[in-house]
Image (tube, rainbow, N blue to C red):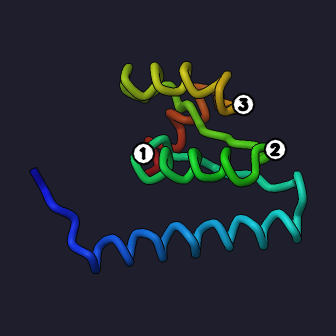
Amino acid sequence: MYAVKNDDTVRYHTLIADTSELFDRSYAKHGGKALYMSSMGLESMVLMYMIRRNIPDTTMVTIDTGRLPKETLDLISLMQNDYNLKVIRPDDRDVDDYVQTK
């Protein structure tokens, strides 16, 4: 079993407090007009959870390019209702054109 070092615990709690303070300032400045763009990666999941707890009326958005793995699409499906996640789906031709230029 991994034992959390005291320094790690202090750092963790400091990060949580700092992030919560950032959410509070954002809400005070923008109210319900905040938007979070998610990559659906691990860090995004943590931030989405924290945002939902601190600023529940924040709009959360992700992009489905039509090239995402099944696991990500399954996660998006789960998150759409619980997190009011909006999904942007660009035209396939636009995605193909963009990929070909890179």
What residue is at 58 percent from the left and 28 percent from the top? Answer: 79
Q: Nearer the viewer, residue 61 or 29?
A: 29
Element type at marker 3? loop
* Residue 58 horizontal/vertical position (percent): 77, 47
Tell me the CA gap for discs 2 and 3. Answer: 9 Å
Tell me the CA gap for discs 3 and 1. Answer: 17 Å
What residue is at 78 percent from the left and 73 percent from the top? Answer: 25
Q: Nearer the viewer, residue 47 or 36?
A: 47
> Which label's residue is closer to the chain start, 2 or 1?
1
Which of the labelled discs sits on residue 41, or is there none?
1
**Residue that numbered label 2 is attached to:** 57
**Residue that numbered label 3 is attached to:** 84
> Which label's residue is closer to the chain start, 3 or 1?
1
**Disc 2 residue crowd, few under 14, some 14–19, many 20+, Cα 10 Å:** some
**Disc 3 residue crowd, few under 14, some 14–19, many 20+, Cα 10 Å:** some
The type of residue carrying mark 1 is Gly
- In front: label 3 or label 1: 3
Would you say 73 lies left or right of 6 here? right
